[in-house]
Amino acid sequence: MRRVSVFGATGSIGESTFDLLSRRSDIQVVALTGGRNVTRLAQQARALQADIAVTAYDDCYQGLQDALAGSGIAVAAGTQALIDAADRPTDWVMSAIVGAAGLVPGFRALSQGATLALANKESLVTAGPLMLACAAQHGGRILPVDSEHSAVFQALAGEDISAVERVIITASGGPFRCWTKGQLEAATLAQAQVHPSWSMGQRITIDSASMFNKALELIETREFFGLDPAQIETVLHPQSIVHAMVGFRDGAMMAHMGMPDMRHAIGYALNWPERAALPVPRLDFATLRQLEFEAPDPDRFPALRIARHVMELRGHAGTAFNAAKEVALDEFIAGRIGFMDMARLVDRTLDKLISDSGLTAPVRALETVQAMDQMARATARELVSRMSKGN
């Protein structure tokens, strides 16, 4: 019986993972974690007969306990409870917590030699060298679950990385692909949280609209595959059928294609190194008609430009970038800054930290990553205050 845990079970990735796990009879679910949707978390825990269900929020403990009363499933709440759940012996862990909060549980899972199915892109963006070293030290393994990185991983199966000339990850362009910069300045929260191709949570949908999600994925590609930034490209592809392409030095190009359904990448990671039948829609090339590709405009989507700067800086720049991006997203959702102000805030945060701190120092310890994360968040919040005053 294979032991499995899911961190971020009630989000979009977690729900897709739940769907696949609920179809299996050879799985023992150790831990499920979620946020404030304790009703759904309890439903999942009962359906999968999990050993423990954990909510990240202390004030949700009673609600989760009530929802699981009489089930025999253990209940816990809070940040430490998430870490404790990650310490439970497990063979395969889905890391789908959104943001930097997923970093420590991922480390703890790798430390016990588990396979980490990584949907939390922030982990590699903020602490890529540490994550990879931790996996190597403890016999753990990281399998990418972002559709783009899973596509690259699959295209590289049996290939020598030294033969790779370029990697192209695709972006749908979100709801604002054809908008002018003037229109983007006035984009609203309601408009930014509706995606034309994928069904995702609010935060990642807005990140897709601003291209910050793709910016994180550029950095993640650099960290996971060890490529030079010049080898990594991105193109807009509104159909979301081609997820990534790998070009080799002999001119050949391998493209990974599939309907926009995250169960592709999740199922690949769950069944790796084998391929198993998955309940996903199949491509019908007779009705597909056409595939469109276009270069992204860095003036309208400055997050991509900032990401390339971060890849050049290395060190703790990825941590600062992600922390500032999370603050910027919080501020946009709260209505305190505009859509295009998010990129301005991240840009200014990085500029200030370059001059005020050891931003480019090598990443050597989780503690320094966490310290930079807090410093960048404080800096970004200070800059938001100045922006609101017109400075």
Image: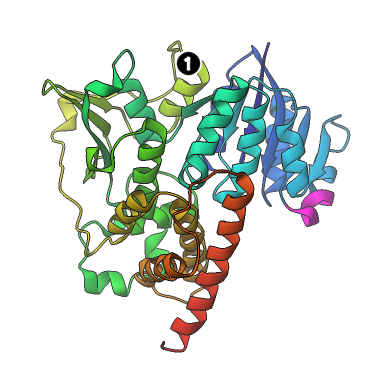
Q: Is residue 18 visible?
A: no
Q: Is residue 180 left or right of residue 311?
A: left
Quarter of the view holding residue 169? top left
For badge 1, the amino acid type reads Trp
Q: Residue at x 54, y 30 (%)?
A: 133
Question: Is residue 168 shown above or below 331?
Answer: above
Q: Is residue 301 visible?
A: yes
Question: Is residue 69 shown above or below 382?
Answer: above
Question: Are there few (<14), some (14-19), or many (20+) residues within 10 Å of tag 1?
Answer: few
- What's the magenta region? 57-62
Outermost residue to the left? 251
Q: Is residue 66 left or right of residue 19?
A: right
Residue 383 part of the magenta-drawn span:
no
Q: Main secondary structure of the magenta part?
A: helix
Q: Residue at x 61, y 45 (%)?
A: 366
Residue underneath mark 1: 272
